[in-house]
Image: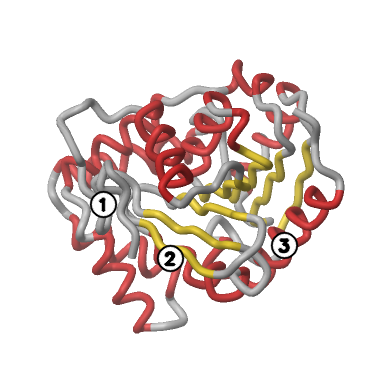
Amino acid sequence: MPVTRKRIYYETAGQGPAVLFIHPPGMGHITFRRQKEELSRSFKVIAMDLRGNGRSSLYNSRPLTMETIAEDIISVLDHARIKQAYICGYSNGGSMVLEAAINYPDRLKGVILLGGFPEVNSFLLRNEFKLGIWAAENKWMGLLAGVLAGAHEWKSLKNMWQLASYVKRTPPEVLEEYYRIGLEYKATDRLGKIQCPMLLVYGQRADYLHHYRKLFSRKMRAPLDMILVGNVAHQTPTRKGSAINKIVKDFIIKHEATPTLQ
């Protein structure tokens, strides 16, 4: 499988308009196994491992920042020889997509955020990040891996084991740094710089994230759509894979038919 010059691992499948998936810290490209399997029938699907996660190297001693991560995302597109792509980020992976959209507007056809947020400003979300920092600080990667895998893949012991094993590949100090960056990140006042259409997708039961819809509506200038997925909380790409796949497919087809002028 391909690895960029910066030693960023990624996988591709299918042909057609490109859609790149960005995972939350620790979870790796296998978070999107359902999207890769189904959406690759219609599109070129790319799923990468973030720097220092899964099969990707830290590459160098350069400080880890959202800007660095955004550069890595674009480096994957460069390595795959893709001029423009739709980019889908899940949870904190969505913050990384926002940074890429703000800094590289000519490379994105559209943004899809699954449970995304431009800043951490709610009590529950802030404490989720702090809990992750605490677990990583104490090197309780087994516990953290088990919690993440159980929340996302509880219907399949095989998938649960694979995801837990993948989370454990990330060094605890790297995961802690990702959580700290995510907790401190704020793109709210820069959302108006995003030029491509955006789709927000939230689980109906993820109430602590729903207020972000109003925030995006106030700050965004580009076309913005929002969808709530029923009978699920935050773990939409794994627990509601088929529904997410249809939503992503419909969004891409819509904007391929009526491209946004940049």
Residue at the image position 32 percent from the left and 48 percent from the top: 4
Q: What element carries label 1?
A: loop
Q: Identify which residue is drawn at 21% across, 53% down.
A: 170
Can residue 240 be seen in this snapshot? no
Residue 209: numbered disc = none
Q: How far apart are marks 3 and 1 (CA)?
A: 28 Å
The residue indicated by pointer 3 is: 249
Looking at the image, is mark 2 or mark 3 nearer the viewer? Answer: 3
**Mark 1 or mark 2: whose residue is earlier in sequence:** 1
Task: Decide: is 256 above or below 221.
Answer: below
Instruction: Report the side of 203 relative to 156 (left or right).
Output: right
User: Marks 1 and 2, Cα distance to the nearest angstrom?
Assistant: 24 Å
Q: What residue did someone put label 1 on?
A: 56
- Whether residue 216 is visible here, answered yes or no, is yes
Residue drawn at the location 76% of the way across and 45% of the way down: 226
Left or right, residue 56 beside residue 219: left
The colour scheme is secondary structure
Q: Which of 238 and 132 is in front in this view?
A: 238
User: Tags 2 and 3 in contact by the CB under 8 Å rule?
Assistant: no
Q: What element carries label 3?
A: helix
- Which residue, given by chain and number where applicable, does mark 2 sit on? 151
Marks 1 and 2: which is nearer the front? 1
| Real-space CA distance between mark 2 and mark 3, rounded to the nearest whole angstrom | 25 Å
State the quadrant of the N terminus: bottom left
Crowd band around label 1 with a 10 angstrom C-alpha radius: few (<14), some (14–19), many (20+) = many
Indicate the quadrant where residue 17 lies.
bottom right
Residue drawn at x 75%, y 52% is: 227
The spot of residue 217 in percent (x, y) is 76, 29
Q: In which quarter of the image is residue 168?
A: bottom left
